[in-house]
Amino acid sequence: MTTVAAATAKLLADAGIDRVFGLPGGEVLVLMDELRRAGVDFVLMRHEANAGIAAAVYGKLRGQPGVVLSTLGPGAANLMLPLSSSYLDQEPLLAISAQLPDDFPSSHTHQLLPLHDAYRPVTKYVGKVTADSVDEVVPRALAACMERPLGAAYLTLSAREALKPSGAASPAITVLKSSAAKDAETHRRGDPRQKAVELAGLLGKAKRPLVLIGLGIDPANAKRIRQWLNDWDLPVAVTPKVKGIVDETTSNFVGVVSGMAADEVMCDALKAADLLIGFGLDPVEVDKTWHAELPIHWILEAPNVGGLVPHGTELVDHAQFLDALLAHQPPSTWRAPFGVFQERRRAKLNDRSGAAGVMWPGDIISALAGVLPPETIVTTDVGSHKYLFGQYWPSRQPETFWMSNGLSGMAYGLSAAIGAKLARPDAPVLAAVGDGGFSMNAQELETAERVGAPFVTVVLEDASYSLIKLSQEGKKLEPYRVDFGPIDTVKMAEACGVEGLRTVNPDELARAAGRAVEQQRSLVIGIPVSYADYRRLF
Ligand SMILES: Cc1ncc(C[n+]2csc(CCOP(=O)(O)OP(=O)(O)O)c2C)c(N)n1
């Protein structure tokens, strides 16, 4: 007899899922055991939210859904953050939690939450795994995560149902499709060759074109995109979540748009352009409204987050479109039309006159970029340090930069680093976090050690929620409740079994990070910074 739990585990294993991340409760032990028997490892973490983030990054890097497993009630409630993150950051995530059995007395409310109702708005598919439905809902949930825009699905399985023989009766399933998924089926698609001719015509007339690459591109097209931009010598900017799709050390790279450091410079550059090409651009990453105010020539192959497609835009296959473009000669030449903005952007990072802190934030970037190889995967939390790394980390290769930017949730970096390192064991991984975010989930350093996922963490210590402190200043409010006392980063690391050090010296920082990467071991480096220095960068 195959139980529902065994059938679920087999469906996941057959779909290529080799790891499930999570934190158990009694109600999911049978499924966990079946996963073990099916050869699917369980990555035990210390908070469901962290497990979900790690799973989503792991999944996206492997081109399949990440899977997170939690118990019912409180464990399931902790899934709101990763499901929301998956939804707004286009990271494929299947969450499975327990739920009370349907045939419990209706007066039994202990740990009972309306989980399907809670998660339906942020997922593309919600389903109940039962003896009748398991063969259908598990594959559908997996598929929904991978339909573009990539996103989340949520399944419940009660401990009682898990033990029943699977496939006992005829299927009676409720398929709950979000409007986003329905929209995806209804959008018009254009002819790639015709669209290429149209864009070449527009570019032929443009003096200052700027290609804006965003979350809606498939990294599999990186080579084509690079070739097109290189052959035509086109100025290009990216959003943080696709950093590395182009080599940011090349001369036609203008910068990172969507509210990172030097945003004023980038917004000026956008306004100076006479043709903005939104290549897979998803406004979900943009914290201002220029995406709706400036004219943008959209080249999208799938709807954006929320199922949104700008009015009148036909979707087009990016690979075919790029191939068609590459068959054309460049319709014009553009001589560094954004040179002045590129210079302003660089100058901000390098101007350390009047620096208030012991280490200028720009020196952190230079020290680490000088020693870490181009394949290094960088993850960040959310805060001032994210603006710094988002704009100035010189990404070289696709899929090497991970940040929560659609949701913009703190405490993403460490969990993302675990998922990234497990997915790409050979790539060095660097997590750059603030001391606020670090104190939300530093305990996952122990997880990283235990599961064999070593990486370097730099903690930018300013004893404040500095981005919020700067915002308070900007609104001319009294300084109020945005500072906290220091927690010793080094001791936190050591308490989790990881070596820690604190440095105010860029050379020592570079040496220590380089050595840890070489020796493939975890290291946490605390770097004292001043929040006031960020003011000068933004
Ligand atoms: C979960 C969550 N809570 C609150 C916020 C609002 N927020 C954005 S940045 C930030 C400060 C982060 O502080 P820290 O991690 O120390 O980074 P820093 O800004 O100092 O670089 C806060 C509170 C958020 N984005 N996510």
Image (cartoon, grey):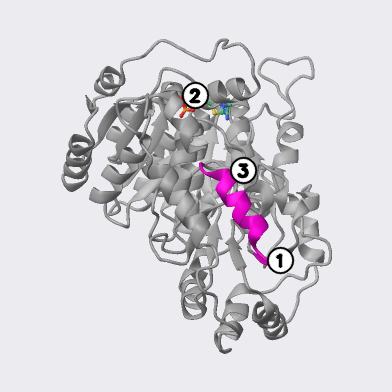
Distance from the alpha carbon under mark 3 to that under mark 2? 20 Å
Q: Earlier in the sequence, mark 3 or mark 2?
A: 3
Q: Position of residue 463 (x, y in %)?
A: 41, 17
The residue at label 2 has a CB less than 8 Å from ligand 1: yes
Q: Amino acid at mark 2?
A: Ser
The residue at label 3 has a CB less than 8 Å from ligand 1: no
Q: Amino acid at mark 1?
A: Trp
> Which mark's residue is nearer the viewer, 3 or 2?
2
Q: Which residue, given by chain and number where applicable, does mark 1 sit on? A: 298
Q: Nearer the viewer, residue 158 or 359?
A: 359
Q: Which residue, given by chain and number where applicable, does mark 2 sit on? A: 466
Q: Are marks 3 and 2 in contact (CB under 8 Å)?
A: no
Q: Amino acid at mark 3?
A: Gly
Which circle marks residue 406 in the picture? Answer: 3
Residue 14 in the image: above or below residue 480? below
> Which mark's residue is nearer the viewer, 1 or 3?
1
